[in-house]
Amino acid sequence: MRELHRKYGRRNNRKYKNIIINHIQNNLKEYIISSIIFFIGILLGIVFVNNLNDVQTSEIQTYITNSINTLKENNVKEISVLKESLSSNIFLAVSLWLMGSTIIGLLVVYLIVCFKGFCFGYTLSSIIYVLGTNKGILFFISTMFLKNIIVIPCTIALAVSGMNVYKSVMQDRRKENIKLEVIRHTIFSIFILILLVLSSFIEAYISQNILNYCIKYI
């Protein structure tokens, strides 16, 4: 019986893996475009930090230093991190779903992806600038790494789904086709939302505990 369960599990894993691979292969161009837009956002965030004036740099340094000192003195409760993360991720998923469901919202989808990349590049660059390379990387791994393994691909995947709605509607403007594409986009968005919720729990109950342990070395 145990061997049967193993075979069934392996078969399902291969099935889901093939679905994901086929999805990426069928939308490779869209994934490349979305990834490039995200990467541009990262570069803009890094360039922005590198071109801050002395006053702005001092403000960032004070903010990060005070935040770390607060973490050292008081461990942040997981539930507060979870609430903040869930709010951010749900807003992201709903925004990309809503904009991706409308033809005129495609530009906003691009802007959201670029902005997420900008925030990532800005935050990482600021942390390394203030803490130095070693401590900055340690802080990044303990706070941002695990959640972004899920959040970044999910953001790009939602953007691709919205691009597919636009592409399909441009090719076939029948009401039935539009309705079908929006339903597909909605189902896909719900699946991505579940993954984003999972990333929130990882951030709150795994990353936060890692941070509480690592903060004394930062």
Image (cartoon, rainbow, N blue to C red):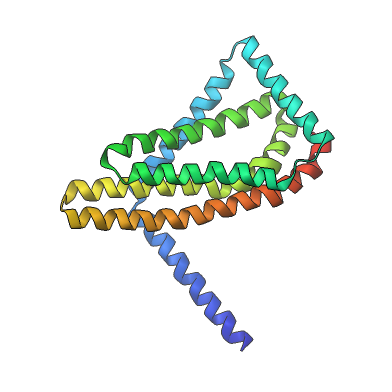
Q: Residue at x 35, y 41 (%)?
A: 99
Left or right of 185? Residue 138 is: right
Where does the image place residue 68, in percent across and percent down from the top left? 76, 31
Q: Which residue is drawn at 56% across and 15% down?
A: 51
Instruction: Judge whether 135 appears above or below 81 on screen.
Output: above
Where does the image place residue 112, in percent across and percent down from the top left? 43, 35
Left or right of 32? Residue 65 is: right
Left or right of 61? Residue 21 is: left
Camera-side residue of 155 and 88: 88
Where does the image place residue 181, in percent across and percent down from the top left? 28, 55
Q: Which residue is drawn at 53% across and 22% down?
A: 47
Q: In which quarter of the image is the N terminus?
A: bottom right
Tag count in the figure?
Answer: 0
Q: In the displayed orientation, state which residue is furthest to the bottom.
A: 1
Q: Quadrant of the C terminus?
A: top right
- The answer to whether residue 41 is visible is yes
Q: In the displayed orientation, state which residue is furthest to the top.
A: 54
